[in-house]
Every structure is written in C-alpha cells, then in structure tokens.
Image (cartoon, rainbow, N blue to C red):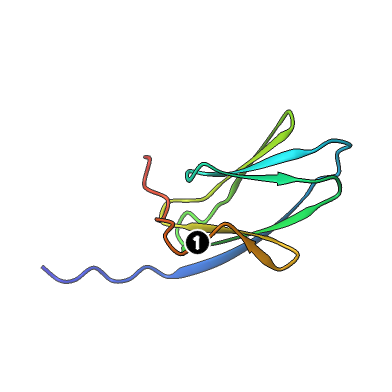
C-alpha cells in the first residue's frame, strides 16, 4: 500500500465586526470556545487546513455569532493582532460526515 499523498493546504481570513448596540459572544466550534465581543469590536478569524472543503460557516443568532471550521481545519481568533485563546493544543475539526 502506497503512502497517502499530503493534501494541499489553504488559509482563509474572515473579519467579523460587532455593529450591534449590545455585547455579543463569538463561539468557535467545534472547540466550544467563547469570546465576548464588545460594541464595535472586530475579530479576525484565520482558518488553516486542507484546501478541499475549505469553508468557514458563520451563523448569527440573538446576541451570538457561531463560527465553525471545515474538516481538518484549525481556526484562530485575533483581536487587534493578539491571538485570543491558543491554537497550540487545538485538534483539527473532525469529519462529522
């Protein structure tokens, strides 16, 4: 059996801004991380993983925003250039399919 060829990798940047008149919480899934977003604050979400299926899903709800990575990806959240949380021990998104 021949070794599996490595998948081509990609990187995606998404800027998310709280333009509401109230505080929001950004949830990063599937890791269950929570990041409060102040009024007019802006976060940068950076996803890195396999090029195949590279889509970041964003869902808006009342007082919340949920961001979910694609299979094999790891997402990082930045506020004014500083990483929130840590991607050091974060496992890639599993295949839920």
Q: What residue appears at the point 46 percent right and 69 percent down from the top-left corner?
A: 9
| Pick the front one: 45 or 36 | 36
Q: What residue appears at the point 55 percent right and 52 percent down from the top-left corner?
A: 55
State which quarter of the image contains the C terminus. top left
Q: Is 2 displayed left or right of 94 in the figure?
A: left
Q: Is 27 displayed left or right of 36 in the figure?
A: left
Image quadrant assignment for residue 62:
top right
Residue 94, percent from left and from top:
37, 48
| Pick the front one: 43 or 12 | 43
Residue 95, percent from left and from top:
36, 46
Q: Secondary structure at mark 1?
A: loop
Q: Residue furthest left?
A: 1
Residue 30, percent from left and from top:
48, 43
Residue annotated with mark 1: 87
Q: Is residue 90 above or below residue 6?
A: above
Label 1 crowd (10 A; few <14 / some 14-19 / many >=20): few
Q: What residue appears at the point 42 percent right and 70 percent down from the top-left corner?
A: 8
Q: Is 19 displayed left or right of 31 in the figure?
A: right
Q: How many marks?
A: 1
Q: Is residue 71 above or below residue 48?
A: above
State which quarter of the image contains the N terminus. bottom left
Q: Residue furthest right?
A: 21
| Pick the front one: 14 or 41 | 41
């Amino acid at each position: 059996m021949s070794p599996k060829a490595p998948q081509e990798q990609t990187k995606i940047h998404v800027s998310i801004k709280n333009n509401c008149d109230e505080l929001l919480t950004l949830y990063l899934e599937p890791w269950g991380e929570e990041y409060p977003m102040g009024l007019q604050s802006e976060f940068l979400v950076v996803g890195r993983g396999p090029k195949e299926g590279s889509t970041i899903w964003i869902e808006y709800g009342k007082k919340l925003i949920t961001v979910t990575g694609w299979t094999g990806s790891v997402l990082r959240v930045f506020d004014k250039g500083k990483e929130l949380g840590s991607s050091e021990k974060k496992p890639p998104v599993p295949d839920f399919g």
